[in-house]
Amino acid sequence: MNADTIFAVASGAGHAAIAVMRLSGPECHVILAALCGRIPAPRRASLRRLHDDEGAELDRAMVVWLPGPGSYTGEDAAEFYLHGGRAVLSGVADALVRLGARPAEPGEFTRRAFLNGRMDLTECEAVHDLVAAETEAQRRQALRQLDGALGSLYRVWADRLRLLLAQQEALIDFPDEELPPEVEAQVVEEMRALRSEIAAHLDDNRRGERLRDGLVFAVTGAPNVGKSSLVNALAERDVAIVSATPGTTRDALETRVVLGGVPVTLVDTAGLRDTTDQIEAEGVRRARARAAAADLVIEVVETDAPENHASVCVANKLDLGRPVPAGAIGVSALTGEGLATLRDRLAAAARSLTESSGPPPLTQARHRSALHETAARLAGAQEADLPELRAEDLRLALRAVGRITGSVGVEDILDTLFARFCIGK
């Protein structure tokens, strides 16, 4: 794949004043010279007239020549800052194909950066997360991972496992030598300490994954207590039908909002009550299931105290002069009274569920799976009766950590990982 020279539009779709087209690969300098007449100075934006292979002018564009290995992909690369018209983009793309380049596949630029050693897999995943970030909190998390904080942690653990394996191999290869007795004790203690650190890293309440994917807050309560009105007020748009007739909401309705810098899906559920209506009963069943799986439950009540001890209790319809139960937040979805207090409470809950201190949090299910395997292998090494079995468990633990950063055994996941990327990245 790296033998091809690839190109793609890296800017967004639709009309724009400027569009960015990227080019990378072994024939990049030849193609660039053909388009521009001569190659611009490296790493300087140069104004050039672009011509196709028949000499027809395509555009006047800013061109940046990025010789490898000091480029995003590690290969010779170039960027064209073109006028954003579709005819311009189509003409330049056709010219690139005739000159020997081909359109890039999704994620192919970043995949080449990984294959050429410009970044590890955790940094590649951070690129995807940064492009997909909806909120400031997601952006900060992705940038921290892109800076290598997570990869550095895993490489330190890999180095420690490598040293443990070397010490264990020495105990196997030189059984008759007078190795200090504390060597084996140090191996056992270091295995215990490393396993403890990994366990603490895994015991994070999935904060990084929650921030990356977004939280789910389920809005529950009896029929006609104002759940749909509250969801509409929090979303600041009409998401759900509001009616005085109990049981209007039959299925779970979802809308995306941002609370405390965290993306949150609000789920408006069917009113909870006993009913003989089969459709409404199914809605109640789904409502209970969504509440059980939600990160936080917002229970809407009228005058009674909450029955389910929900994380957040809300008494709607303050405009009707109803008393607010103890522990509830009084609001009026109609007038807006109390909504600011409720938003602050929900934002604090969203931050509490996603903020982390210390080492960077886990952000991917595959990281978690690999670390669970690492911890299990370390446990096996601690319990191994034979030194050879202990060494094998340490070797497998090292391999599991290496799969996270991409240093070993990642061929089977590359296609899946990079297929999620947008074209041009």
Image (cartoon, rainbow, N blue to C red):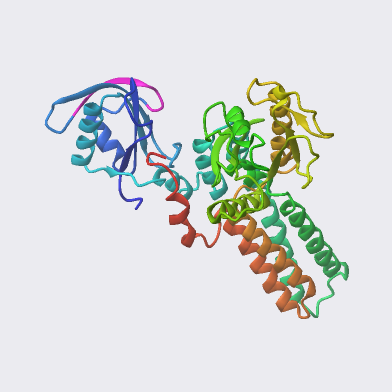
Q: Position of residue 174 (x, y in %)?
A: 76, 76
Could you tell me which residue is drawn at 83 percent across and 70 percent down? 184
Q: Position of residue 178 (x, y in %)?
A: 84, 75
Q: Toward which corner of the image does residue 81 lie, by quadrant?
A: top left
From the viewer's perspective, tell me whether residue 234 is left or right of residue 125.
Answer: right
The residue segment tinted magenta is 42-51
Q: Toward which corner of the image does residue 310 lie, by quadrant?
A: top right
295, 92: nearer the viewer:
295
Q: Position of residue 225 (x, y in %)?
A: 67, 36
Where 371 falls versus 349 (above or below)?
below
277, 414: nearer the viewer:
277
What type of secondary structure mainly makes up the magenta span?
A: strand
Could you tell me which residue is drawn at 75 percent across and 38 percent down? 312
From the viewer's perspective, tell me whether residue 184 is left or right of residue 211.
Answer: right
Is the C terminus in the top left, top right, bottom left or bottom right quadrant?
A: top left
From the viewer's perspective, tell me whether residue 312 is left or right of residue 373.
Answer: right
Q: Is residue 46 magenta?
A: yes
Q: Position of residue 142 (x, y in %)?
A: 59, 38
Q: Is residue 58 magenta?
A: no
From the viewer's perspective, tell me whether residue 159 is left or right of residue 182.
Answer: left
Q: Residue furthest right?
A: 181
